[in-house]
Image: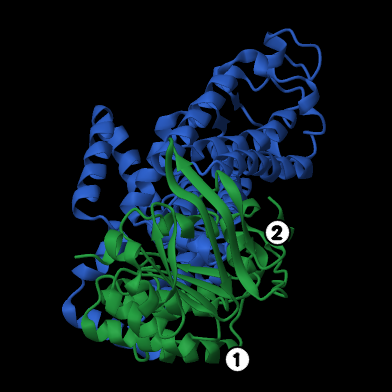
């Protein structure tokens, strides 16, 4: 157990990119979930990733967060972090936060406690045992609570929140970690139209402050948050097309495999 | 609304102090009052209460890993027994030459025709060294076992089965005569502890009070831990370990910490148990004993700290009475109790009791909690 792995080293982004994926291949029993995938994300960019089911979107996130090891290829966070060599918690510490497809919050804890657990700080055993919240930290939690529209519900158990509120809480937990890169896996799945609109608003507020990668099926939502930014279309484990939303929507192959109807 | 756990309320504190004072008063009634007095507490009753407190401490330790962290151990008996054996080594050495054979070696070694103590009995004539062993041996075992099990991400029922196998393996090892721990007879016939006769009323009262202090101390320690941020991380291990990893905690270190601490508390319970009960043998490591501990916690209410203590007292009180009155019924009663609790009282006595209180009392309590939170 290497404790020094947990120490947060600064992410070196001198070349302007926060994430590079180079020729990543992941095979499960011969099936190539990712097939020579190449992708890079710039600092401060909000990138949307779309693609049909089985295109490898979730596997790609698993590789970035250390849950799955690539069969070949390399994944770099900034210039210095080789993600293929790091554990999940070390990656989280280095500054990559991930929201899962299904909301995963601690249901037996209150909203406040969920955010407190996620807050960026020394997360080893002893400091955790003696941790006391400073006023400044409480203010930070309160600010995030407002940002994710859960004010008034701070002391409600997370298990009692609505589906949409849980998704927001999870985004709030990501923000508490002060990550440089945020991965969002279908953040509006199962949300009502009003909730989806609120989420788009929330992501637009975060634009520029963090590098964000959003995987989403909902085209209306993607159009809303992608604006003039790049959209990447995945198909069968590699990049099919990349460009502005309107360019991608006009791309022949994309229409054929995904949008076409 | 955020609900303060019962133990953190003013009422909880008051009850804790009252119970501690009440338990501390028992030995006074034993020593000061004549045997004919109506309030006299017999030596037997005192010993029984002392034994129950040891069980309660073990149950408390188990609650820390099972109730709060979601790690079900079916092998905590091994830590309890190792603590007891470590202290037992000192007690055996204290017999001196008063054994049946008049040798400076314990009877079982004379019987095996051993000429001297084996190397691992070195220094065990020193009380302080044995107390160190009480903590270190089970602690080290738990640490090493836990490290490999948690590192391999063994969870749930698989982990439980391995702990069960571990205690069984240790039982078989200790049953062997040539292991050097008295085989199936274990350690018994203790004469004195720190120079005091082990049967003297004063000694028994001192042991009783030491057990009470250990139990209350452990309760306060556990209460502090589960109320800290670390306690919330432990509940996170129970409710969503992968989420915990993705927000930057290493579950391995947290599990290892609480697992080792629990083993050490359980070992201390065993060390306090052996001089009061006067015997320790390998049957304490039988899988059934560890399962019984789990039942105390389940019946009392897991994840409540106070519950397992009550559970240990309730179940063992019932056991003492039933095994005397209807010896053949005990295992059936235990099984039935477990089934009933699992079906109808999933939160155990402490988790269910508030629902049985009259509505008005409950509302008052809720109001109080709200005030205290505000």
Counting residues from the N terminus, which is met first, the one under dot 1 or under dot 2?
2
Residue sitting at 31 percent across and 33 percent down?
Answer: B323
Compared to residue B70, the image places residue A40 above or below, namely below
Colour that chain B carries in the picture? blue
Disc 1/disc 2 C-alpha distance (Å):
27 Å
Q: Residue B161 placed where, x, y %?
A: 43, 34
Depth check: give the residue in front, A223 or B156: A223
Residue B270, numbered label: none
Colour assigned to chain A in the rendering is: green
* Residue A82 at x, y percent in the picture: 67, 57
Q: Residue at x 40, y 60 (%)?
A: A234
Residue denoted by label 2: A5
Quadrant (top left/top right/bottom left/bottom right) for the C terminus of chain B: bottom left
The answer to whether any part of residue B71 appears in the image is yes
- Residue name at image x 31 percent, y 51 percent: B299
Chain letter of disc 2?
A
**Residue sticking out furthest to the front:** A252
Q: Is residue B221 above or below residue B202?
A: below
Q: Residue beneath label 1, please?
A: A136
């Amino acid at each position: 157990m290497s404790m020094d792995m947990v120490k947060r080293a600064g992410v070196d982004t001198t070349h302007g990119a926060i994430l590079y994926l180079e020729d990543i291949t992941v095979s499960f029993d011969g099936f190539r979930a990712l097939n020579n995938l190449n992708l890079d994300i710039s600092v401060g960019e909000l990138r949307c990733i779309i693609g049909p089911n089985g295109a490898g979107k979730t596997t790609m996130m698993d590789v970035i967060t250390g849950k799955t090891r690539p069969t070949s290829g390399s994944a770099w966070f900034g210039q210095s972090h080789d993600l293929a060599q790091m554990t999940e918690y070390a990656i989280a510490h280095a500054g990559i936060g991930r929201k899962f497809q299904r909301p995963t919050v601690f249901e037996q804890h209150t909203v406040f406690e969920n955010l407190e657990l996620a807050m960026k700080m020394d997360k080893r055993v002893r400091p955790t045992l003696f941790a006391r919240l400073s006023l400044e930290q409480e203010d930070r939690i309160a600010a995030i609570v407002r940002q994710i529209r859960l004010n008034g519900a701070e002391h409600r158990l997370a298990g009692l929140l609505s589906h949409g509120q849980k998704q927001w809480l999870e985004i709030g937990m990501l923000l508490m970690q002060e990550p440089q890169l945020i991965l969002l896996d279908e953040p509006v799945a199962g949300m009502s139209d009003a909730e989806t609109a609120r989420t788009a608003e929330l992501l637009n507020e975060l634009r520029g402050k963090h590098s964000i990668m959003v995987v989403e099926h909902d085209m209306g939502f993607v159009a809303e948050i992608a604006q003039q930014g790049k959209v990447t279309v995945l198909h069968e484990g590699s990049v099919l097309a990349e460009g502005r939303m309107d360019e991608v929507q006009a791309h022949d192959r994309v229409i054929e495999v995904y949008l076409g109807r | 609304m955020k609900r303060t756990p019962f133990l953190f309320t003013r009422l909880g504190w008051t009850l804790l102090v009252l119970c501690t004072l009440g338990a501390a008063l028992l030995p006074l009634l034993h020593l000061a009052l004549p045997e004919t007095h109506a309030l006299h507490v017999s030596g037997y009753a005192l010993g029984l209460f002392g034994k129950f407190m040891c069980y309660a401490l073990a149950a408390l330790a188990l609650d820390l890993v099972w109730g709060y962290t979601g790690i079900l151990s079916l092998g905590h008996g091994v830590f309890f027994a190792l603590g007891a054996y470590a202290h037992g080594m000192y007690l055996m050495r204290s017999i001196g030459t008063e054994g049946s054979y008049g040798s400076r070696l314990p009877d079982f070694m004379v019987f095996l025709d051993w000429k001297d103590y084996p190397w691992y009995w070195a220094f065990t004539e020193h009380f302080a060294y044995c107390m160190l062993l009480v903590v270190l041996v089970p602690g080290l075992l738990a640490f090493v076992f836990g490290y490999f099990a948690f590192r391999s991400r063994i969870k749930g029922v698989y982990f439980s089965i391995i702990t069960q196998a571990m205690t069984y393996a240790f039982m078989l090892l200790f049953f062997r005569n040539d292991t050097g721990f008295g085989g199936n007879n274990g350690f018994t016939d203790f004469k004195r502890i720190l120079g005091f006769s082990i049967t003297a009323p004063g000694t028994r009262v001192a042991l009783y009070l030491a057990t009470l202090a250990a139990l209350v101390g452990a309760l306060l320690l556990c209460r502090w831990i589960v109320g800290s941020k670390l306690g919330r991380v432990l509940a996170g291990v129970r409710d969503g370990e992968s989420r915990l990893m993705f927000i930057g905690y290493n579950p391995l270190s947290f599990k290892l910490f609480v697992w080792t601490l629990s083993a050490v508390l359980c070992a201390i319970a065993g060390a306090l148990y052996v001089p009061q009960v006067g015997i320790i043998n390998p049957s304490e490591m039988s899988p059934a004993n560890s399962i019984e501990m789990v039942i105390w916690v389940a019946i009392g209410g897991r994840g409540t700290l106070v519950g397992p203590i009550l559970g240990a007292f309730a179940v063992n009180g019932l056991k003492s009475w039933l095994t005397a009155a209807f010896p053949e019924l005990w295992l059936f009663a235990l099984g039935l109790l477990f089934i009933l609790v699992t079906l109808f009282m999933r939160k155990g006595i402490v988790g269910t009791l508030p629902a049985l209180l009259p509505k008005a009392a409950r509302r008052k309590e809720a109001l109080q909690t709200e005030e205290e939170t505000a």
